[in-house]
Amino acid sequence: LGYTNLSVDIHTVGDVARAVSKGADEELRLLAKRCQAATTAKEVSSILHQAGMSVENVETSETTVPDGAIDPVCGMVVHQTGNPFVLEDANQPHYFCSEECMDAYRRVQAP
């Protein structure tokens, strides 16, 4: 889609691409911040609806990932099993969504 750090369900890429082409970059950044602050998929769906974007296939039930962990940099829910982006810190694993987030964590934690 041409945006960095945009995570979209594979089934909604077409809908999101059409919605993205309608908005200005700053408006999309503000919308993304509101969506990131949401705590459930239902809230995200509501935010998108209020913005005039109807993204089909948005799951409105509370969804959890059985082996999920939260990326400490971006807050994304990621799988633990098979995740190549893992760092051990004081014998505690930290799971990341990408190499970029893992590197950002390393820079902040460096002495």
Image (cartoon, rainbow, N blue to C red):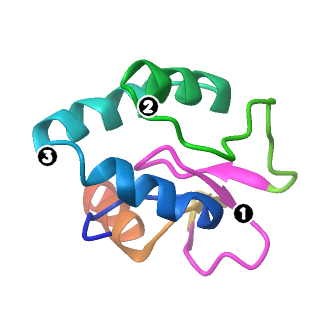
98 sits to left or right of 78 = left
Residues drawn in magenta: 68-87
Residue, x 51% and y 63% (percent of image)? 13
Residue displayed at 53% across by 49% down: 76
Say which label, 3 or 2, has the lower sequence index.
3
Q: What residue type is disc 1 on?
A: His
Q: In which quarter of the image is the C terminus?
A: bottom left
Q: How many marks?
A: 3
Q: Is mark 2 on a helix, strand or loop?
A: helix
- The crowd level at tag 2 (other Cα within 10 Å; few <14, some 14-19, many 20+) is some
Amino acid tagged 3: Asp
- Residue at point 48%, 47% (across, down): 72
Label pair 2/1, CB-CB below 8 angstroms: no
**Quadrant in the picture for residue 31:** top left
Amino acid, disc 2: Cys
Q: Residue at x 32, y 69 (%)?
A: 1
**Would you name the residue on which mark 1 appears?**
79
